[in-house]
Amino acid sequence: MKKRQITTTAALMLLTAAVTYAGTLYSVEREYDEKLDNFNTQEQEYARITEVRKYIDNYYINDYDRNKLIDGALYGMVAFLGDKWSYYLDPEQFASFNNSLESRMVGIGINAAYDYDTEGILIFEVFEGSPAEKAGLRPLDIITHVDGVAVGETGFDAAVNKVRGEQGTAVRLTVRKADTGKTVDTSIIRQSIDIESVKARIIDNNIGYIKIRSFDSNVDKPFEEALKNLLKANVSGIVFDVRNNPGGTMQSLVNILDLLLPEGRIISEKNKNGDMKEYTSDANEVKLPMAVLINEYSISAAEFFAASLQEYGKATIVGTPTTGKGSAQKPIALEGGGGLILSTSKYYTAKGASLAETGGIKPDTEVPLTQDEIKRFYKLTETEDRQLQAAIGAIKNKTGSLKPQ
């Protein structure tokens, strides 16, 4: 009896081992087949590229730059993802991009945004003494081509990075002038330009004002210093101005919002695998009436800055609706030089909203500017800036409501 039990047990063990082996073999074979299919697909894809390259080498009548040919192929690969926030940068452009995140850049000295109507680069600020100013560029001028290539063809971010480059080199621009409507070609020599990311002052007697030009990798430190100085001055409220702010790094945004918000979630990030990462703030917060100035050129981190303060009920949002950018881009350095700016995750507000789906931030108080006001935006006085005056009014309404009755 015992012998039969032992034999049966041994048989079951062998059967289990055989089933396990068969299952493992099937899994390995399936994984191998998938890899083989993937390899064959990739081989066919590369064969198409090699075929075109062979015909160019054998029959193309003119000389060409092999590196530019490769750059063009890489650019096209990313461009045809259909994501306007993802693009390829050649080595020179990628170096310039990295410098711009540290408030340093080599370029022509403009602040600009994408103009959807013309698919061009809309200039809304020309830095004083910059190469752009010397070349006659003015606010509301539109750059339609960079080095002979249409901005609409390359995409806004890629075109802007083409404007940047090595110091002392020239960039050719085709510009549609705002005052005449005529198109002119101009060549501008790039220079190194320092960008002041934060400006602060006291306005209307006792209201703090902080202008954040961009959320670059170093902006949180000067912001914290500016905030401390205003709090020491016992301001009655603070206006934050993120109009024409193109965004920047997530960590800088989180560091700044942590100073202003109570304990809780600031923003959530979800990657391709569905993994969610949350950024939170501690219990320390600024308990003052606040207002945030936004417009259609407040993008990415600038939008989430306004959204966070709005969702927590900390600030009144004033201006015009934002664009609605809900994805994050990661700069990826390539071994052969250059780099990718690739959308790798999606962002959600503290309440779980996607700005790409909601269409951006809607101001609590909408104040559109006229074309003349937009043209003179950086020359408007404090009293001429109607959006700023509306923000000041919002602060005063809040401080008035805090006074004892």
Image: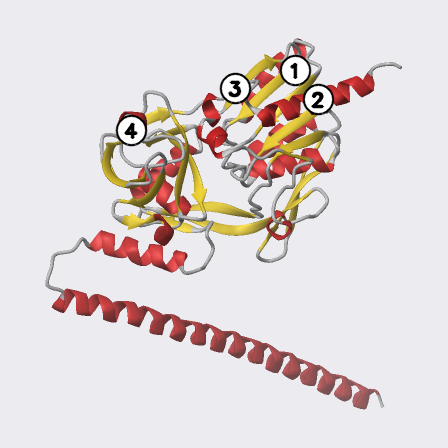
Which numbered disc covers residue 22?
Answer: none
Between 191 and 139, the one lying in front of the other is: 139
Q: Return the x and y of residue 299 as percentages of the image width and height.
A: 53, 40
Q: Return the x and y of residue 126 as percentages of the image width and height.
A: 38, 27
Question: How packed is label 1: few (under 14 Cα within 10 Å), some, or many (20 or more)?
Answer: many
Q: Is residue 78 left or right of residue 298?
A: left
Q: Nearer the viewer, mark 2 or mark 4?
A: 4
- Which residue is identified by label 2? 395
Circles 1 and 3: CB atoms closer than 8 Å:
no
- Give the spatial CA distance, label 1 vs label 3: 14 Å
Circles 4 and 1: CB atoms closer than 8 Å:
no
Which numbered disc covers residue 207?
Answer: 1
Q: Nearer the viewer, mark 4 or mark 3?
A: 4
User: Which residue is depicted at the point 44% across and 30% down?
Assistant: 375
Note whether 161 is above or below 102 in the view shown: below
Indicate the quadrant containing the C terminus: top left, top right, bottom left or bottom right. Answer: top right
Q: Secondary structure at mark 3?
A: strand
Which numbered disc covers residue 199?
Answer: 3
Circles 3 and 2: CB atoms closer than 8 Å:
no
The residue under label 3 is which amino acid type?
Lys
Query: Is tag 4's residue or tag 3's residue first in the polypeptide sequence?
Result: 4
Query: Is tag 1's residue or tag 3's residue first in the polypeptide sequence?
Result: 3
The residue under label 1 is which amino acid type?
Ile
- Which residue is identified by label 4? 136
Indicate the quadrant containing the N terminus: top left, top right, bottom left or bottom right. Answer: bottom right
Q: Is residue 8 left or right of residue 405?
A: left
The residue under label 4 is which amino acid type?
Gly
- Give the spatial CA distance, label 2 vs label 1: 8 Å
The residue under label 2 is which amino acid type?
Ile
Q: Nearer the viewer, mark 3 or mark 2?
A: 2
User: Which residue is depicted at the point 76% across and 22% down?
Assistant: 398
